[in-house]
Image (spheres, grey):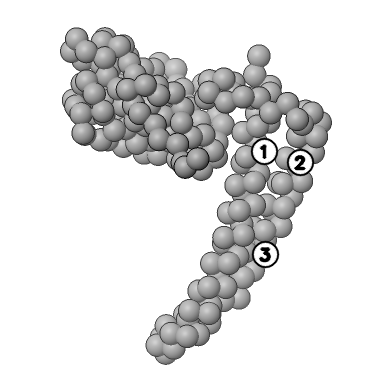
Amino acid sequence: MGFPVYDFRTDIRNILVTPQIRSRFLRMQPGEVSQGHTHDLGHEIFLILAGRCEFTIDGESQELGPGQMCVARVDQMHSVRVIGDEPMTMYLSVTPHIQPTHTFWDEEGHKLPPRFASHSAYDQEVDSTLTDDELLSRHVQAAAATAAAATACAAVQSEQADSLRQAMVDEDWDTAAAARNAMWAAISDLHRRMAAQDTLWNELAPRAVK
């Protein structure tokens, strides 16, 4: 069987949920308003597929209809209100998706305590193959691996920076490429370690939700 194909007219749910991205189709009813919030780490992209709505991002409001898109960047307060008599359907993605993904504020502008969502809130099943203790142990091990990769990455960047700088001055592109590639290999390894840790964190964090 080939890759799955999703339809915004029927698949109103989270489609892909990983630490790198959460993407979904969302339908809201006429007059419905989302609660304003920000994201500490991620940008959120909204693409309107049907109906009309009003987005408010950082205090500025604009009306959007089918085929139009807007972006709420990190730390930008945003909310949406459906306008007109028809439901509104959108595609949205949040990148990255590391719990807690949403940050809420009180009326005085103070950040409220973090809210960790359950697996079901993102249309995911609980992985019951690992006990809480096993998951905690793996998470701690992944954190240590990330720390080690970060230290190694910093050393490689420092070691290769002078070589890359001089090679670019000399227009020695083979040497420049070698230095750049070594820097990238260390960065890539660090990101892979971080992704592994983020995956464990997103599995662990909802277990403490009532």
- Distance of label 2 from label 3 (alpha carbons): 21 Å
Q: Is residue 11 left or right of residue 17?
A: left
The answer to whether the residues at label 1 and label 2 have Cβ atoms under 8 Å apart is: yes
| Label 2, residues with CA under 10 Å away: few <14, some 14-19, many ≥20 | some
Identify the residue position indicated by label 1 in the image: 200
Q: Tell me the kind of residue under disc 1.
A: Leu
- Distance of label 1 from label 2 (alpha carbons): 7 Å
- Distance of label 3 from label 1 (alpha carbons): 22 Å
In this view, which residue lies farthest toward the front?
A: 1
Identify the residue position indicated by label 3 in the image: 152
Numbered disc 2: secondary structure: helix
Q: Is residue 55 left or right of residue 192?
A: left
Q: Residue at x 37, y 21 (%)?
A: 10
Q: Is residue 10 left or right of residue 206?
A: left
The answer to whether the residues at label 2 and label 3 have Cβ atoms under 8 Å apart is: no
**Which quadrant of the figure has residue 92?**
top left
Q: Can you give x and y, in whole percent of width and height, for residue 159 in the image?
A: 60, 75
| Label 1, residues with CA under 10 Å away: few <14, some 14-19, many ≥20 | some
Foreground tag (3 vs 1):
1
Identify the residue position indicated by label 2 in the image: 138
**Which quadrant of the figure has residue 208?**
top right
Q: Tell me the kind of residue under disc 2.
A: Arg
**Mark 1 or mark 2: which comes first in sequence?**
2
Q: Is residue 165 left or right of residue 144?
A: left
The foreground one among 18 and 10 is 10
The foreground one among 42 and 181 is 181
Q: Residue at x 62, y 33 (%)?
A: 202
Q: Which mark is residue 116?
A: none
**Which quadrant of the figure has residue 29?**
top left
Q: Tell me the kind of residue under disc 3.
A: Ala
Q: Is residue 116 visible?
A: no
